[in-house]
Amino acid sequence: MASYTGITTLHVNVRRERPSVNAPTFRTLKPNQEVEISHAITGEMYLDSNIWYVLTNQTFVWSPAVSTTSEVPLIEKKLLITADDIGVVDEIDIGAQIALREGWINSLAVLVNRPEDVESTYLKDFCRKLRDYQTPSGRSLFDTTHIGLHFTITSGEPISSHTTVRRLVDENNKFLDFRKFNKDFEKPDYVTQIKTEFFAQYEKFKEIFGREPDHLTSHHDVLTFNRPLFEFMQDWARTKGIPLRNHRYLPGSKRFWYDTLALMQVNLPSTNRMNEWEGRLGPFPIDCSQRTVVDHYGPIPPFGITCYDSIVSKKQRALDSWMKDFLVSTDSRREIVIHLMKSAFRSQPDFVSHYGSLRSTYPGIEIKYFDGRVAEYLSLQKNCHWKTDPCLGLLPRL
């Protein structure tokens, strides 16, 4: 985006971090000083205006203090806040329901292969609760929440008959661990079985929620694991007009594990390679500019949390940094993926003991990370930035 020259008309403080008169001062400008403007955003209301300019040095200045002969573009910032892995663990889903009611999140990524629930009774009841809860706008949570399909071939067991997806499961008919992915999954018979299972989960989603998914994501980001799978999902999403989580923002920590550890023989293609594949398919038919950052709170500690206060503070600092980056960027939409859990447990051994049966009934969700999920819940409970920040708004569901 082009920059725009402005001239200050009075003494004005240039702010760091946020477009607010309470933000730290970067410097004070005198009248008739020149500034370079990137774009305008909505910020804190001061006197008669809430429009602030974002300068090219990534600071903020109150717009009425600056004169410009050009029309500076105003970028409205919208967030998609997605709670991941819904549908399998009750306490994860309770945390998400509370978060929806409190306005902390506006999106769900739902797994539809809950163990021992062939009729999807649990998720249908979850859906009913969303329908029954009325928001202040008079619409139900079901109507205002982005509900997406969280496709999985790395957790739990298939919706399809085991015999039709034999390549994808182990001797217990559970999906293979994601670290089992290798070049074999590019072979036609594997790809055919992946498609079979995808369509089974897609149809199950529509049966439960009575509508198309609002977006498509995947457990362990398997949509990015090889070219046949990548191109199939891209083609399907484009045909259906359903947003697909952007591959460019796979967390750096996850890329490191996938790319460098010998025991993880995933052979993940590079971002540049996936960009080439996507480029050959042409532009997406709808606005899918959401950018995914799933490690803004992280990484989730690999060892048990001993001090929740320090972890929550660390998460808040990371979120502050991410928000600043979003505000000074020219992006109008981004997505944050979070992992919430409402639980009275705090000790990792307690989580492992209480949820140990999941390792056999639904392998593929790491129990040792449950304390990290609780920390994310506590972080939003302590300070949910987008509820009180005039710069940011949740992306509405049309």
Image (cartoon, rainbow, N blue to C red):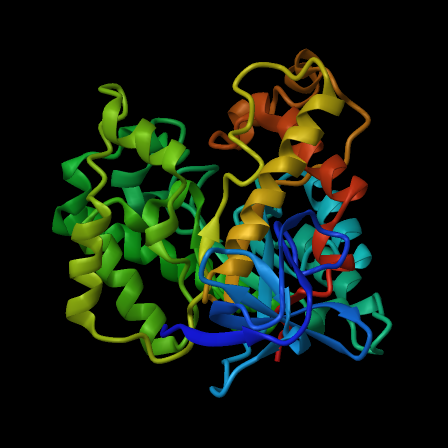
Q: In the figure, residue 257 lies in which quadrant?
A: top left
Percent position (x, y) of residue 292? 46, 53
Percent position (x, y) of residue 396? 64, 73
User: In the image, what residue occupies the spot 79% across and 50% down?
Assistant: 98
Percent position (x, y) of residue 366? 53, 27
User: In the image, what residue occupies the spot 72% across and 16% down?
Assistant: 307
Observer able to see residue 22: yes
Total marks shown come to 0
Q: Is 74 or 162 nearer to us in this picture? A: 74
Q: Is 199 or 99 nearer to us in this picture? A: 99
User: In the image, what residue occupies the spot 16% across and 51% down?
Assistant: 273
Does residue 186 appear to the left or right of 50 in the view shown?
left
Does residue 113 appear to the left or right of 186 in the view shown?
right
Does residue 165 appear to the left or right of 339 in the view shown?
left
Q: Is 266 rendered above or below residue 333?
A: above
Q: In which quadrant will I find the N terminus?
A: bottom left
Q: Is 176 rendered above or below residue 275?
A: above
